[in-house]
């Protein structure tokens, strides 16, 4: 898989997760909002990990 595409996909999914967590905050409450933030953070960390490994 192209690493640039993987980095883009991780960041895009992270931003989509942030938008979904904002929606869930209004619909389901604070617990869903925090779970969405944790999930989005995982995607951003994965994208950053792939970006850093690209140089090796």
Image (tube, helix red, strand yellow):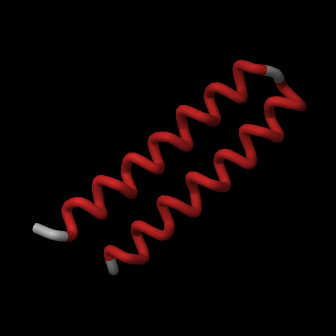
- Point out the image quarter for the N terminus: bottom left
**Residue located 71% across and 29% down the image:** 33
The outermost residue toward the right is 27
Above-or-below relation of 34 to 8: above
Q: In which image quadrant can residue 54 be found?
A: bottom left
The outermost residue toward the left is 56
x, y percent for residue 52: 23, 60
x, y percent for residue 3: 32, 74
Above-or-below relation of 28 to 10: above
Q: How many marks?
A: 0
User: In the picture provided, is 28 more to the left or to the right than 31?
Assistant: right
**Residue located 46% across and 50% down the image:** 44
Above-or-below relation of 31 to 7: above
User: In the picture provided, is 43 more to the left or to the right than 24?
Assistant: left
Q: In which image quadrant can residue 4 be found?
A: bottom left
The outermost residue toward the bottom is 2
x, y percent for residue 35: 62, 28
User: In the picture provided, is 30 more to the left or to the right than 39?
Assistant: right
- Point out the image quarter for the C terminus: bottom left
Above-or-below relation of 1 to 49: below
x, y percent for residue 5: 42, 76
**Residue located 71% across and 26% down the image:** 32
**Residue located 74% across and 45% down the image:** 20
């Amino acid at each position: 898989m192209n690493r640039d595409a993987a980095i883009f996909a991780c960041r895009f999914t992270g931003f989509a997760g942030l938008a979904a967590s904002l929606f869930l905050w209004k619909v389901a409450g604070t617990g869903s909002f925090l779970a969405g933030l944790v999930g989005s953070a995982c995607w951003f960390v994965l994208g950053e990990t792939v970006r850093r490994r690209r140089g090796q």
